[in-house]
Image (tube, rainbow, N blue to C red):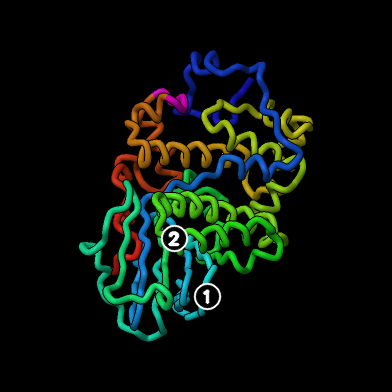
Amino acid sequence: MASVLDSPGKRFHARKSLMLDRSSKFEPSADPLTDMLRGLRLDGVEYARCRMAGDWSFHYPAQAHAHFHFVSGKGCWLQGPDGEWSRLTAGDAVLVPHGAAHGLASAPGIEPRPFPRRDCRAICDNVLDYEEPGADPGHATVLFCGSMRFNLDALHPLMRMMPDLMRAQELMVSEPAIPHLLDAMIAECGLNRVGASGILARLADVMAAQIIRSWVEHGCGDAAGWIAAVRDPEVGRVLAAVHAEPERDWTVQELAGVMGVSRSGFAAKFAAIVGETPSRYVTQVRMHQARQWITRDRMRIAEAAHRLGYDSEASFSRAFKRVVGTAPGRIRAPAGGQGLPGAPA
């Protein structure tokens, strides 16, 4: 039985097949999109709660991680990645999934100043607190800002499709859970109780994931391309299966079985809807997984090659470079995005 990835220089270890229980088949839900979103996670890298008064402005430089902002109190202004200004009021939550450069200010046009990191107080492991001297709690803008790390690779189709800016308020009509999360965050922002900032951090993680889920389910309902493919009853099952088990040595016959069609009709339908061959798509998913292992988990390149069944590190590196565009050895140290959210450029 030929593997989808069978070609010169890409033979797989026989023992890898023994490690996989071929009798246990992937069991998709009725909605493949649910399977794709089930594994989506965001981990908070660092958060800062700030009470601001008077004239102020922060520039958020581009970074590798996503930005998250929640506004309470007086409200403020947002300069989006496109350079346009818009008003944020109490209860607004904003996600910048690609970490694009943007700004927050008390009013448009104020020159950004350095974020006073040295004056911040550490509340817990990854949460800092800053209060502008003389800020009246009743008339201050309260910001809860964070950097978040996706468990998905940046080249994942879902990540590539996300807009540069996503606002919770625009999704509230179609997502009844969002207003309750926003109310809970407002309540925690106004409290000085023990653990309030830690609870805010966890709520922010949930809020960001909720924004993404609502956008996928409602905000891009007419989308074509990958979203349309994953919503196809037959192709969607295949995509969900591949993403659920990227290490698996998928064969054409197995993928056709997941789709529920003959092997002869599988490749044609897959390519017509997804826009590329099953072989290329599977390779992309596997290389994106390898990039996560190497950058996020600090896995050795040789181990990543072995886990994906490559005979040599060299053949793995060639496949990796074809998909990612650079050699795996050049991505071991992720660029940027490790500092405090809100630190200006």
Q: Is residue 242 left or right of residue 131?
A: right
Which amino acid type is marked by label 1?
A: Thr
What is the secondary structure assignment of the residue under circle 1? loop
Name the outermost residue toward the bottom. Answer: 109
Q: Quadrant location of residue 172?
A: bottom right
| Figure label count | 2
Cα distance between the residues tagged 2 and 1: 19 Å
Against 261, residue 38 (above or below) is below
Q: Which label is found at residue 191?
A: 2
Residue 109's spot in the image, x, y percent? Answer: 37, 86
Q: At label 2, which amino acid type do we have?
A: Leu
Give the vertical position of 82 relative to 153 (above or below). below
**Residue bearing mark 1:** 89
Residue at image location 41% in from the left, 62% down from the top: 145
> Residue at horizontal 36%, vertical 47%?
326
Chain part drawn in magenta: 307-311
| 308 drawn magenta | yes
Quadrant of the image containing the C terminus: bottom left
